[in-house]
């Protein structure tokens, strides 16, 4: 998501308006690719139900995969991430520090799970819990479950 966001908004501000436009663009691109016959996966936090509902309405064959991830796990995994400049370093730690101390941090917008709640979906077709399993194992589980919806996926 961030890679595409930076193409649409070269200097992202992460404002609510910009986020709405970025997610809308992301879904429309995915929907277009899907209509051409491509298997399309949209990897995004999508913390607002409205964005996921928009995707569900736009995409013909939509499967929502919800991966529950406590903030502590997000922080741990983020610390292991290789710096590819797609995502700000220490995003969650900085957001938590900002929240506790009330200090403004330049370039840091609202962070889902810290500044804004993740609006949990009751209609997700696949729900995985990342509390005790590795990202690799979760990916394998997601792919296995996706095969039930679309047998030709990932072949």
Image (spheres, helix red, strand yellow):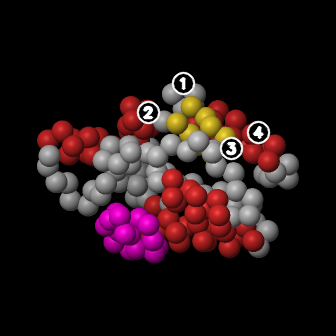
Distance from disc 4 to disc 2, alpha carbons, whole Å, reads: 23 Å
Quadrant in the picture for residue 127: top right
Q: Are marks 4 and 2 in contact (CB under 8 Å)?
A: no
Q: Residue at x 76, y 73 (%)?
A: 36
3 and 2 marks in contact (CB < 8 Å)? no
Secondary structure of the residue carrying tag 4 is helix
Up/down of 139 relative to 133, above or below:
below
Q: Determine the residue positioned at 38% across, 48% down.
A: 112
Residue 3, can we see it? no
**Mark 4, mark 3: which one is toward the viewer?**
3
Q: Is residue 138 left or right of residue 75?
A: right
Q: CA distance from mark 4 to mark 1?
A: 18 Å
Q: Closer to the camera, 119 or 65? A: 119
For label 4, the residue is 144
- The crowding category of the residue bearing disc 3, from other C-alpha atoms within 10 Å (few below 14, some 14 to 19, many at least 20), is some
Q: Position of residue 139 (x, y in %)?
A: 65, 40
Label 2 belongs to which residue?
Answer: 70
Which quarter of the figure has residue 74?
top left
Name the secondary structure under disc 2.
loop
Q: Which residue is mark 3?
A: 125
Q: Are marks 3 and 1 in contact (CB under 8 Å)?
A: no
Label at residue 132: 1
User: What range of the chain is rendered magenta?
Assistant: 7-21
Q: Which mark is first along the chain, 3 or 4?
A: 3
Q: Nearer the viewer, residue 79 or 142?
A: 142
Pointer 1 or 2: first along the chain: 2
Q: Residues within 10 Å of mark 4 (few under 14, many from 20)?
A: some
Spot occupied by residue 125 in the image (x, y as percentages of width and height): 68, 44
Q: On the rendered structure, is 44 left or right of 142?
A: left
Q: Residue at x 44, y 33 (%)?
A: 70
Cα distance, mark 3 to mark 2?
20 Å
């Amino acid at each position: 998501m961030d890679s595409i966001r930076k193409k649409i908004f070269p200097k992202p501000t992460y404002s609510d308006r910009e986020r709405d436009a970025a997610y809308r663009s992301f879904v429309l691109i995915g929907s277009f690719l899907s209509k051409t016959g491509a298997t399309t996966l949209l990897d995004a936090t999508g913390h607002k139900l409205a964005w996921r509902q928009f995707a569900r309405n736009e995409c013909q064959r939509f499967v929502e995969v919800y991966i529950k991830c406590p903030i502590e796990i997000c922080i741990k995994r983020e610390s292991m991430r290789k710096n590819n400049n797609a995502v700000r370093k220490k995003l969650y730690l900085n957001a938590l520090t900002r929240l506790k101390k009330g200090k403004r941090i330049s370039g840091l917008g609202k962070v889902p799970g810290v500044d804004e709640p993740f609006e949990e979906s009751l209609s997700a077709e696949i729900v995985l819990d990342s509390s005790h399993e590795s990202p690799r194992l979760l990916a394998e589980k997601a792919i296995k479950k996706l095969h039930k919806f679309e047998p030709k996926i990932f072949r």
